[in-house]
Image (cartoon, helix red, strand yellow):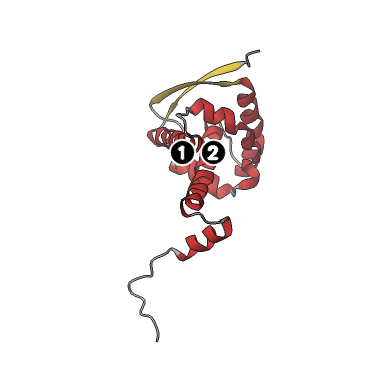
Amino acid sequence: MEQASREWSWNISSGYFRLITECIRLFSNSKLTFGSLSQIIDERCASASELHKNYRAEDLKKHLEIIPTDGELPLKITILESSYDAIDDSIPEIEKLLGDSVSFANAVSLLLFDLVVEENRTEFVTKFGLSMLEAKAYKAAAKRADGKVVPIR
């Protein structure tokens, strides 16, 4: 039995377009197969309900400010009806956290932001073969000293 799907279209910004293509790259590399935006949304839709718990409001707002949703580039995709419902159901909690209205396209953008955060953390850890704790300590240490600081002997 085939699952019901929903076609969805909107005009996106160039920043949103780049976010999508980066997520497709990350997703494809993690799966070792060419992926699509529809596949990403269908696979990750359940995590939409956790966005309001996993991020601070200012971080989500900053993401939406830096990567605006609306723009001139047309985008049309087909996703599972259940994916649409899962994301749509997450919007009230995200709106409550942000104190502002959130469109479906904004919610998808935040879902993609979550993928970038997760994949970059995972990519960093797996590239070096570190545990999460080791990666956190390494990342904190991996900073250049300000050239104006003279070490005390």
Q: Secondary structure at mark 1?
A: helix
Q: What residue is rendered at 48% in x and 47% in y? A: 123
Q: Which mark is residue 2?
A: none
Residue reaching furthest top? 1
74 in relation to 137, above or below: above
Q: For the N terminus, which image quadrant?
A: top right
> In the rendered structure, which disc, 2 or 1, sits on the residue that comes first in sequence?
1
Position of the C terminus, as image quadrant, is: bottom left
Residue at 64 percent across and 25 percent down: it is: 85
Alpha-carbon neighbours of circle 2 within 10 Å: few (<14), some, or many (≥20)?
some
Percent x, y of residue 12? 43, 29
Judging from the image, what secondary structure is the residue with disc 2 in? helix
Q: Amino acid at mark 1?
A: Leu
Q: Is residue 70 above or below residue 153?
A: above
Please state which amino acid type lies under the numbered disc 2.
Answer: Leu
Q: Residue furthest bottom?
A: 153
Check disc 1: other Cα within 10 Å, few if <14, some if 14-19, many if 20+: some
Left or right, 29 with reference to 132: left
Image position of 26 with respect to 122: above or below: above
Could you say which is closer to the camera, residue 125 or residue 53? Answer: 125
Q: Identify the image quadrant of residue 98.
A: top right
Residue 110 is marked as 2
Q: Which residue is mark 1?
A: 26
Residue at (66, 38) in percent of width and height: 93
Q: Quadrant of residue 90?
A: top right
Give the left or right position of residue 134, taking residue 143 as reference: right
Give the vertical position of 10 relative to 125 (above or below).
Answer: above
What percent of the width, then of the height, locates residue 59?
54, 48
Residue 2, percent from left and from top = 63, 14
